[in-house]
Amino acid sequence: MYKKILVAIDGSKSAYNALDSAVDLAKQFNSEIYLVSVVNTANLPMNVGVSYAPGLTRDLEDSAEKDLQKASEIVKKAGLSSTVKLLNGEPREQLTRFPEENGIDLIVMGKTGTSAFTRVFVGSVTRYVSEHTSINILIVV
């Protein structure tokens, strides 16, 4: 039923709960797992004129890569393989566009992030994706 499952990874407990659910589903349906993290470059401070602050972008990418590596290890320990993608841009748009462009059958996302600020932000991303995609979505607490 679900051949390609995307899991949105942001490092939060809720995201890893979502990953656990996705692993269970992948075992049941013999699915491919896509682990996706989005570095939000839409709201980064800009250098004069043209580019993002390079140090800040790199720090965010490093953190996201660590989260993806941890998620990939969890999938591997479960006896499955995964495709890992680190995207840059506005998370709501990327997490709506990427699944459509890659034939994803199910999007699995955590309901909230870890801090008060993240909870508002991630909750808004989850809500946006659930309202703007034609793909089935599983929201995990």
Image (cartoon, rainbow, N blue to C red):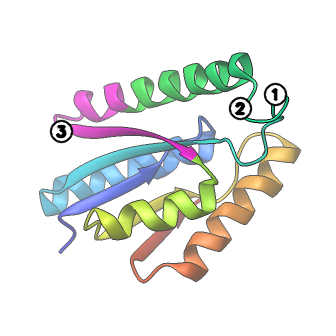
Q: Is residue 88 left or right of residue 105?
A: right
Image point (71%, 32%), residue name: 51
Residue 50 as seen in the image, left or right of residue 85: right
* Residue closest to the eye, 97 or 21: 97
Q: Secondary structure at mark 2?
A: loop
Q: Amino acid at mark 2?
A: Ser
- In the rendered image, the residue lying farthest to the left is 30
Cβ–Cβ under 8 Å for marks 1 and 2: yes
Indicate which disc residue 85 carries.
none
Magenta span contains residue 112: no
Give residue 47's mark.
1
Answer with the quarter of the image where residue 98 lies: bottom left
- Horizontal side of 28 relative to 98 (left or right) equals left
Check the picture and name the quadrant holding the N terminus.
bottom left
Where in the figure is residue 109, as x and y percent of width and height? Answer: 52, 58
Give the mark toward the camera: 2 or 3. 2
Q: Which residue is mark 3?
A: 80
In the image, what residue occupies the spot 78% across and 46% down? 43
Which badge, 1 or 3, comes first in the chain's sequence?
1
* Viewport quadrant of the C terminus: bottom right
Compute the Cα span from label 1 to label 3: 42 Å
CB-based contact (under 8 Å), mark 1 and mark 3: no
Q: Percent from the top left, x then y, of residue 55?
A: 71, 16
Kind of residue at disc 1: Asn
Q: Earlier in the sequence, mark 2 or mark 3?
A: 2
Query: What's the magenta region?
Result: 72-88
Packing grade of label 2 (10 A; few <14, some 14-19, many >=20) is few
